Structures are given as structure tokens and as C-alpha cells.
Image (spheres, helix red, strand yellow):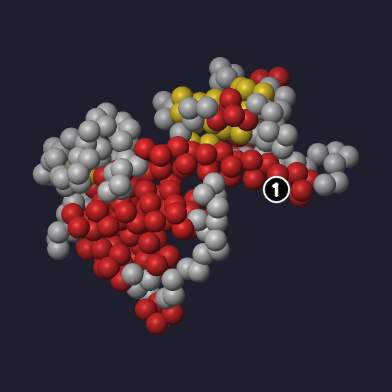
Amino acid sequence: MRILVTGITGAIGAALAPRLAAAGHDVRGMARDPTRATVAGTHGIPVLRADAVSGEGLAAALDGIEVAYYLIHSMEPNVDDFAVRDRLAAERFRDAAVRNVEWALAQQQENGWFPHNCLFDDTQPYTHTIAYAQRGVLEIGAALGNERYIAAAVKIGEAMLKAQPPSGAMPGRFDRDWRPTVRWSCLTGVAQLAINWARLYQLTADDRYRQATRRANRFLKTTQKLDGDPDERGGIKGSHPIDGKYHPWQYPNWAAKFFADSLMLEDQIFGAGQEARRQPLRMAAADPGG
């Protein structure tokens, strides 16, 4: 994964970047003064000069990046407007996120399917990457009150809802017409979709999404390893059956992470009084650019 660590000369950034690189990620840093990166102990990691406050070099630093860590602040000696500067830097990152969403939505088909949305085969993306794309558009829409973004995420939520059987077991890949192309399940994708449906319920009060979250989690519970090797206990497989083509014969740590997140969200949306209190989010009008 291509990752940008802003504030790489700070204590957190300097500690994080080498660990990400050691884990096999393609890491680059960003700093106003790249020469300080060596002092911070980030040897071997390229560091680009950029300033989030002025915007200078920011586009180049973000080019091609899949994940960006925002670890910067404007608290400096002889600077008394750091709050204003911090807000400006955050707004520049927000604008970069909006540009990414706008590019993605320009690719989206009318039925909600995204091309260029898989690590290995764009003609049949995993539910893992389908849900990732949906979540990005959804959360930026929710944060900005942008109804168009949320509507784009709803298209995917509806397509996946139609594909979900009563058992909650979802096929692991779908083509451009939302037809399943495999019989095995990508369990990471099922957990992510459960999260996304829960978030859609929180935003729209549509109970179909809440019930979809429960069905997905009920299925995932049947696949969780609860005995045997302590190093595997509690894990969620890459695929079900385990020889499916998403991380076959493995227990990816992120699968368990997404499952835990989906369980906590299910608990929230089915908690006492939730049904009575739930109201759709009233979003402020937003221009197409966010």
C-alpha cells in the first residue's frame, strides 16, 4: 500500500514510518524541512518537502497515495495564530479528499459499480475493495453533509443488499452488473459491508440496512475460530471456505479487526431505545465539490 506520513519529523511520525516500511508498505514522508527527517531516524524513507498550510508541494506529496496519516500541527515558536493555521492545513487535506471522491464518482457506473476497484482483477472486484470504496465515499459525504456522495454510497449498499441471502453469506467477487462470479465468501468484505450498512442505517434510518448488518454478523460468527491453536483462536479466515481465493488458508488480522468493528456497531444500532430515537441525518446543502 502506498502511504504518506505527514509530520514524519515528529515523534509519532518518525516512529510510525519505519514500522510501516518494515511491514512491506511503500512509504513516503512529508515535512516542511526534509533535512530533519534524518535526525528523526527515518533513514531510507523518501521525504518530500511540502507545507499543508501554504499548500506548497502538497499535491505532489499526495500523488498516488492510498493512505495518508495526518500528523501535523502548527504550534511553533513566535506563532500566535496556530489554531487558524491548523484549520487551514486540515481544510487543504479535506479538499484533497474531495478531489479524490470527485474523480472516483466520475468513474462510477449508473448502477453504483466502480471500475479500477481491485488489487488484482478489475473485472470482478472483491467485496473487500467494493466496501472500501463505498466507505470512503460514504464517510466523506457524512462529514461534509454532501447528499450526492451519500447517494453514491447508497447505490452500492442497495446492490449488495439485493445480493445478500438470508444466511448473510456473501459471494466474494462481483462483476460490473453486480453478478457474483465466485461461490466462496471474502469474510473481510462481509464484515466491512456490515459496517457500511450500519452507517447507512445511522444516516438514513432505513431498517433494511440494520437488519443486513445483523445477518452479516450472524454469518461471520459461524465462521470464527473459537478453539484450537491459541494463535488462531478468535480469528476470522480470509475466505470461507478457507481455500477460497482471498487470502486462502490464512487468518488476516484485519479480518478480525473489521469483525470487531461491525459487532460494536451492531450493538450501537440495536441498543436500548435506538429504534425509537433514530432519525435520518438532516444534511446541510452542499455544492458538488463538497
Name above or below for residue 22 compared with residue 212: above
Q: Secondary structure at mark 1?
A: helix
**With respect to residue 248, does 271 lie above or below?**
below
Which one is in front, 8 or 109?
Answer: 109
Near-viewer residue (40 or 183)? 183
Q: Quadrant of residue 217?
A: bottom left
Position of residue 209 relative to residue 52, above or below, is: below
Can residue 260 be seen?
Answer: no
Give percent across and percent down for residue 83. 76, 50
Q: Position of residue 193 (x, y in %)?
A: 30, 53
Image quarter for residue 37? top right
Q: Residue at x 13, y 41 (%)?
A: 182
Question: In front here: 224 or 241?
Answer: 241
Task: Say which residue appears at 25% left-offset and 63% top-offset.
Answer: 212
Q: Residue furthest top?
A: 44
Q: Residue furthest right?
A: 78
Q: Is residue 154 visible?
A: yes
Q: Amino acid at mark 1?
A: Arg
Along the viewing direction, whichever of 118 and 239 lies nearer the viewer: 118
Q: Quadrant of the N terminus?
A: top left
Relative image position of residue 2 (x, y in whole percent): 46, 28
Q: Residue at x 44, y 71 (%)?
A: 280
Residue 58 image position (x, y, % from top left): 63, 30
Relative to residue 1, is residue 192 drawn left or right?
left
In this rendering, position of residue 209 left or right of residue 52: left
Which residue is at 24% across, 30% downward?
121
Q: Which residue is mark 1?
A: 87
Q: Quadrant of residue 174?
A: top left
